[in-house]
Image: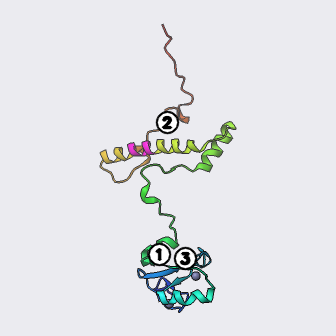
Amino acid sequence: MTDSPSYWRKCSSCKKPIPFGSSYYVCSVSTCNRKRSQMVFCNIRCWDAHVPVMNHREASAEEKRAPSKAESEAHDTPSPRAGAKASSAGDVLVVASRVKSYIQNKSGMNTSASTMDALSSQVRLIADKAIQQAKDAGRETVMGRDIKQPEMGARRSNVVIRRKPRP
Ligand SMILES: [Zn+2]
Ligand SMILES: [Zn+2]
């Protein structure tokens, strides 16, 4: 079993570990700076040593700071829960593919992306009301009964709504 490394990366020149949060040097030459294989140097002498090896004609070093361990891990493994903390506004709360296929099956119509935003706002409104309802009832759990059923639900489909004749 391999433990997660206690250092950030290894120096491309002397192979000594560069600790998290310490400063390091990068080369200004683009071939040493590719995203996947960026060369990093623990000190300026290590950078200096690679210049003749790589046949750089013009090169400079730039000092940077290695991320902390936590930063590094957060960056390397984007967590699927990253957006969960900001669920108050703007997130799509409906399953877009299901909504699309429901509308498609029912009507043969297409569904634009903005529909999901509009539906999500409605879900938020309904959820907010349900939260209030549960609070008023002294509960800490939102339940199905806190959500107001649509007026034209299946149970009422056989109810004939009589309109008053206009005068
Ligand atoms: Zn080094
Ligand atoms: Zn270089």
Does the magenta portion include 127?
Answer: yes
Relative to 163, residue 9 above or below: below
Mark 3 and ligand 2: say if the CB distance to the nearest ligand atom is below 8 Å. Answer: yes
The stretch of residues the image draws in magenta is: 124-129
Residue visible at 39% across and 50% down?
142
Which of pointers 1 and 3 indicates the residue nearer the eye? 3
Q: Which of marks 1 and 3 is nearer the N terminus?
A: 3
Q: Which amino acid does label 3 sit on?
A: Ser
Q: What residue would you read off at disc 2?
A: 150
Depth check, front residue: 85 or 66: 66
Q: What residue type is labelled 1?
A: Ser
Residue visible at 30% across and 45% down?
136
Mark 1 and ligand 1: say if the CB distance to the nearest ligand atom is below 8 Å. Answer: no
- What whole-number distance in Å separates the C-alpha atoms at marks 3 and 2? 63 Å
Q: Could you say whether the residue bearing mark 1 is in a helix, strand or loop?
A: helix
Q: What residue would you read off at disc 1?
A: 72
Give the numbered dot on residue 28: 3
Q: Around disc 1, counting alpha carbons within 10 Å, would you say few (fewer than 14), some (14 to 19), or many (20 or more)? A: some
Q: Which of marks 2 and 1 is nearer the N terminus?
A: 1
Residue visible at 44% across and 54% down?
87
Q: Which of marks 3 and 2 is nearer the N terminus?
A: 3
Q: Which colour scheme is used?
A: rainbow
Q: Main secondary structure of the magenta part?
A: helix
Please provide percent x and percent y for residue 131. 37, 47
- What whole-number distance in Å separates the C-alpha atoms at marks 1 and 3? 22 Å
